[in-house]
Amino acid sequence: MPISTSPTTPIQINTLILLAYKRAGVLPVEATITGANMSAKLSHGKVLLDLILDNLAVEGFMARTMDFYDLPVVAGTASYTLPDTLLDVYEDAVFTETGQTTELICKQIDIATWQTLTDKTTESTRPQLYTVFKDAELPVVKLWPVPSVAGTLRLKSVRLLGDNSTVTNSPDLQRYWLDVLVWMLGWYIAVDSSMPAETIGMLQLTAMDKKKSAVRFSFERPSQQAIVSYTTQWSS
């Protein structure tokens, strides 16, 4: 018998929401996207799905959301507000002066260390340190010393997952997340629909278990090398 080698087709957001309503027991298996009262159900499902995806940020930096962000640096300016598509920036950055190719490290420090910098208006041809303030709606990057030349600061960034406003798109996650999202969305819908406690508990237990496996698989997986150190009679 022939074996299909083609990958599965990604599920559209509206189909995923429909499956979640069925998983929760709110809709029968034969229900369709064009059924009665589906417009309100799809709208509610999109809001819940946005909440679920945004909440995944607390699980850690997933490989899908990690990238580089090139921050344009203006001479004489030390503070920069990041776009609302970025959740955070982390680790050391790289500064390149305009018109040059040499990349110079700009190390990240915490706010406590930033506080100990006695003169935050000091200028130099390039920033050597940066910190991120997160007390406002959007993260703010502050450089030290204040750069006296223009350039680009390449930051390691974590972006927010895409929204679910266009229901004919697929969710902004790999395919192995789709079943997880159906279970999680089904759990949320069951709670909102006042389904029996045993149904809610079953959906929650399954959703959390499946999410745990997906999160574990979603991180970066660089090659690792184990080093064993032990004392012998020849050790100094």
Image (spheres, grey):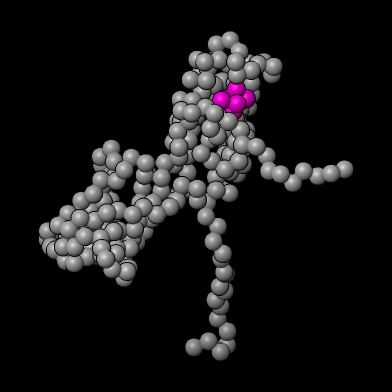
Looking at the image, is 226 positioned above or below residue 86?
Answer: below
Residue 21 spot, x, y in % from top left: 60, 21
- The stretch of residues the image draws in magenta is 14-19
Looking at the image, is 81 positioned above or below residue 143?
Answer: above
Residue 177 spot, x, y in % from top left: 58, 39
Q: Quadrant of residue 4?
A: top right
Count of labels in the image? 0
Looking at the image, is 163 positioned above or below residue 3?
Answer: above
Please report the residue visible at 64 percent of the width from the left and 17 percent of the height from the top: 32
Residue at the extreme front of the image, as rendered: 99
Residue 202 spot, x, y in % from top left: 63, 27
**Is-magenta flag for residue 31?**
no
Please report the residue visible at 62 percent of the width from the left and 25 percent of the height from the top: 19
**Front residue of 213 and 234:** 213
Horizontally, residue 79 falls left or right of residue 191, namely left
Horizontally, residue 76 falls left or right of residue 101, namely left
Residue 214 spot, x, y in % from top left: 58, 43
- Residue 106 seen in render: no
Q: Main secondary structure of the magenta part?
A: helix
Please report the residue visible at 29 percent of the width from the left and 63 percent of the height from the top: 95
Horizontally, residue 10 falls left or right of residue 97, namely right
Residue at the extreme right of the image, as rendered: 1
Pick the quarter of the image with the N terminus: top right
Please report the residue visible at 56 percent of the width from the left and 89 percent of the height from the top: 234
**Front residue of 61 and 170:** 170
- Residue 54 seen in render: yes
**Is-magenta flag for residue 15?**
yes
